[in-house]
Image (spheres, helix red, strand yellow):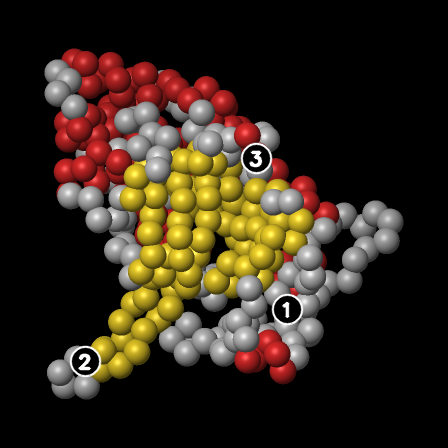
Amino acid sequence: MTLTKSKSLLELRNVKKYYPIRGGLLKKVQGHVKAVEEVSLTLLEGESLGVVGESGCGKSTLGKTILGLEEITDGKVFFKDTEIQHLSNKSRNDFKKEMQMIFQDPYASLNPRQRIGDALEEVFVIHTNLSKQERKEKVIGLLREVGLNEDHYDRYPHEFSGGQRQRIGIARAIALNPSLIICDEAVSALDVSVQAQVLKLLKSLQAKYNLTYLFISHDLGVVRYFCDRVLVMYLGNTVELAPADKLYNNPLHPYTKALLSAIPRPKVGKRSEKIRLTGEIPNPANPPSGCTFRTRCPLATELCGQVKPEWKEIEENHFVACHHVDA
């Protein structure tokens, strides 16, 4: 896709999500866990944007904040040019129909005593005035759309494989014709062969319905295959954003370089040396001053501890927050 010609679907402006830390007899707020810190981002119609980083970097929290499953602490969220976080519940719910999520474990969100057909019909019971027969026809159509069949309508969750359950999760996500789908580790629990099938399904649905994906994952190999652009997060902060090919071929931030060096590669030709990060990820309730990555960065200087690096465009569509990368 051509980034410069695509229309903006979602825009985040300095979005923060803090969780209060309470203590003492009166449970007073004594601090905050800074899960997402001043994230600014534009998601384009029809693109797949990958979000990567170590566990605890804020990837999933960012996705839940966009959907409104978590209330933002500060900042603004625009969907189709409308600021949505301060809308009335009714108006906000209208927008929420256009934003759905596919979870890592769809089985956890399914009632084991409820048939799959009935579970999928609930979407139409809540949001439409369709008759029982019309709802059933819609669900059967969805099952076929994701590679299942009519016989699966009457089955229960335990009768499906992991890949089939994820297809059910996808069917539920596309039921109301959304514009944006957030995939939160949607294929990480699947076997490699099943991953490929599910990713192929997601791509075909994207082409058919012009879907936009925010694809959260720790698997950098999958992200490279699936995504148009990649956002790298560390301790709630964005550190690099670029088109996938550009980021994988020419990473600029030291953290991105370390992540990419850890991707397993076949032993063909000269191998790049794996970059090993020292130390532990800092506590998000008490992040380092200046650059949050400085305590593990091999390039850290005194400046890194004093000044937070500016989020800047180094070259076209390639953004980095690092004192040691110059435009």
Instruction: Name the one closer to the observer, 120 or 41.
Output: 41
Q: Which mark is residue 3?
A: 3
Label 2 – label 1 distance at C-alpha: 37 Å
Say if mark 2 contacts mark 3, CB within 8 Å: no
Q: Which residue is mark 1?
A: 323
| Residue 61 picture location, percent across and down | 37, 56
Q: Dividing the picture into quarters, in which one does residue 305 lie?
A: bottom right
Q: In the shown orientation, is residue 30 left or right of residue 58?
A: left
| Residue 323 picture location, percent across and down | 64, 68
What amino acid is found at the position of numbered circle 3 in the picture?
Answer: Leu
| Residue 318 picture location, percent across and down | 62, 49
Instruction: Name the one closer to the observer, 97 or 84.
Output: 84
What amino acid is found at the position of numbered circle 1 in the picture?
Answer: His
Q: Select label 2 or label 3 by which is in front.
A: 3
Q: Which residue is mark 2?
A: 28
Q: In the shown orientation, is residue 28 left or right of residue 192?
A: left
User: What residue is drawn where x is 14% and y is 86%?
Assistant: 25
Q: Secondary structure at mark 1?
A: loop
Q: Earlier in the sequence, mark 2 or mark 1?
A: 2
Q: Is residue 94 above or below residue 296?
A: above
Q: In the shown orientation, is residue 221 left or right of residue 237?
A: right
Instruction: Name the one closer to the observer, 78 or 102.
Output: 78
Q: Is residue 61 above or below residue 66?
A: below
